[in-house]
Image (tube, helix red, strand yellow):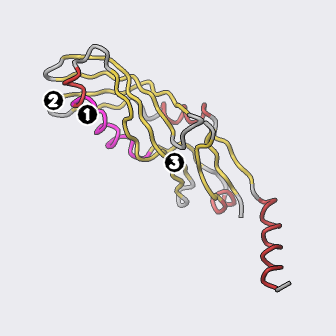
Amino acid sequence: MRPSFVLLLTVSACAAPFRTTIELSEAELQSRLDQRFPIEKSAIVAKVALDHPHVLLDATSDRIGIECEAHAIAVLAGEHHGKVGVSGRLEYDRETSTVYLVDPEIVRAEFPDLPQEHLPMIRDAASIALKTNLARIPLHHLDGVPERALVQSVDVKEGRVIVELGL
């Protein structure tokens, strides 16, 4: 056997036992989100307030979902209540040792009593509110230098948020 191949086998065998995962609980994620709400945004033609977020972890998606209660007041459509569904991805920042929810986007907006022609303006106002107030939501801070140095990945897998640590 060549020495470089033996070294590679040795390093691989040693690295495997030093892998571990941390699962972020839905309750922890919910607590972090609750701290960031309610949010409001006023635009020229509409005002939207989002409140009471609820974390949604879907086993078939690699993103985190949030469902919020929404209160909208539109110049031409009056006052309406509904729900807004938001989806975002995870990002780990090594400098702050923090897992963030980033790039929130509206995937669903339901206002049962709102005329359909007014829905785009409400959706746009809610989207602006998210991008200006929730562009980067801190979800979890990893304490300790070893964790900070060894984070390999942060993913949503099978409806769970998994932080993989290792060499």
The quadrant holding residue 165 is bottom right
Residue 127 lies, in percent from the top left, at 31, 37
Horizontal side of 1 relative to 44 (left or right) equals right
Q: Residue at x 78, y 76 (%)?
A: 8
Look at the image and say whether residue 129 sits in the magenta stretch.
Answer: yes
The vertical placement of 36 against 14, above or below, is above
- Crowding around mark 2 (Cα neighbors within 10 Å: few <14, some 14 to 19, many 20+) is few
The vertical placement of 2 against 61, above or below, is below
Given residues 79 and 115, the one toward you in this image is 115
Asked whether disc 1 touches disc 2, contact meaning CB atoms under 8 Å apart, the reply is yes
Q: Residue at x 64, y 58 (%)?
A: 151
Residue 45's tag is 2
Instruction: Specify the segment rendered in magenta.
Output: 121-136
Q: Please, what secondary structure does the residue beneath circle 3 have?
A: strand
Residue 90's tag is 3
Q: Residue at x 62, y 43 (%)?
A: 157
- Disc 3 to disc 2, C-alpha distance: 32 Å
Q: Please, what secondary structure does the residue beneath circle 1 have?
A: helix
Horizontal side of 6 relative to 104 (left or right) equals right
Amino acid on which disc 1 is placed = Ala
Of mark 1 and mark 3, the one earlier in the sequence is 3
Residue topped by disc 1: 125
Residue 6 lies, in percent from the top left, at 83, 79
Picture quarter with the C terminus:
bottom right
